[in-house]
Amino acid sequence: MPTVQPFDFELPSTGGTTFKLEDARGKPVIVYFYPKDDTPGCTTESCDFRDSTAAFAKADAVVVGISRDSIASHQKFKTKFDLPFELLSDADEKVCERFGVMKLKNMYGQQVRGIERSTFVFDAKGKLVKEWRGVKVPGHVAEVLEFVRSLS
């Protein structure tokens, strides 16, 4: 019986499929968690990943984004900004909880639960090798790319 890795997961994905982390073994996988589709910071981050698609492909890496938004919302976001990677829906927050990215945040003086912008890199064997939490968008994708290139 195969051993379940602590972070193995599967979630519904744009394109009508289910993304399974274990199915991506053999390549580095970048999983970025973001708060909400089509909001300024999330759009910038997603477009930065989009703009680096060729470089991530050259590093043989897979990129996926996760938020609590629905697949329908993800599909609109993906289409609007021509995002070439899959967006995964974690509506019940189970994967977000597993990765510890659900946080209390202050928004307009109110405390709300939301996703803390975070990125995780898994190596080709499926081992978590790097994480960034509380991500600031400017320069982040370049830093992730530099790290992924160092894996080969």
Image (spheres, rainbow, N blue to C red):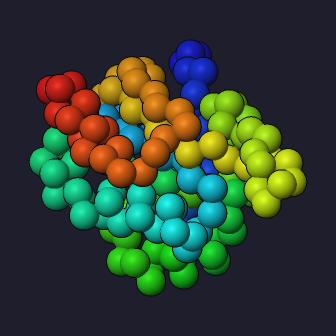
**Relative vertical location of residue 36 with respect to residue 38 in this rendering, above or below:** above
Question: What residue is at 32 percent from the left and 60 percent from the top?
Answer: 48
Q: How many callouts does the rendering have?
A: 0
Please identify the residue farthest to the right as the structure is shown. Answer: 110
Looking at the image, residue 74 sits to the left or right of residue 55; the answer is right
Percent x, y for residue 75?
54, 76
The image quadrant that residue 107 belongs to is bottom right
Q: x and y percent of residue 29 in the render?
A: 37, 39
Task: Kindly tell me whether residue 134 is visible in this rendering.
Answer: yes
- The residue furthest front is 109
Give the residue at x 58% y 28%: 7
User: Is residue 129 rendered to the left or right of residue 98?
Assistant: left
**Which residue is at a point 22% across and 48% down the rendered structure image?**
56
> Can I make out residue 74 in this image?
no
Residue 49, position in %: x, y?
A: 33, 57
Residue visible at 40% across and 24% down?
Answer: 130
Q: What x and y, as percent, mark residue 148? A: 24, 34
User: Which of the pair 71/1 is nearer the observer?
Assistant: 71
* Horizontal arrangement in the rendering, residue 123 relative to residue 94 (left or right): left
Q: Which quadrant of the rendered structure holds the N terminus?
A: top right
**In screen coordinates, is 105 left or right of 40?**
right
Question: Which quarter of the picture shows residue 24?
Answer: top left
Residue nearest the viewer, comparing 136 with 118:
136
Quadrant of the rendered image containing residue 10: top right
Comparing 85 with 42, the one in front is 42
**In the rendered view of the protein, which quadrant contains the C terminus?**
top left
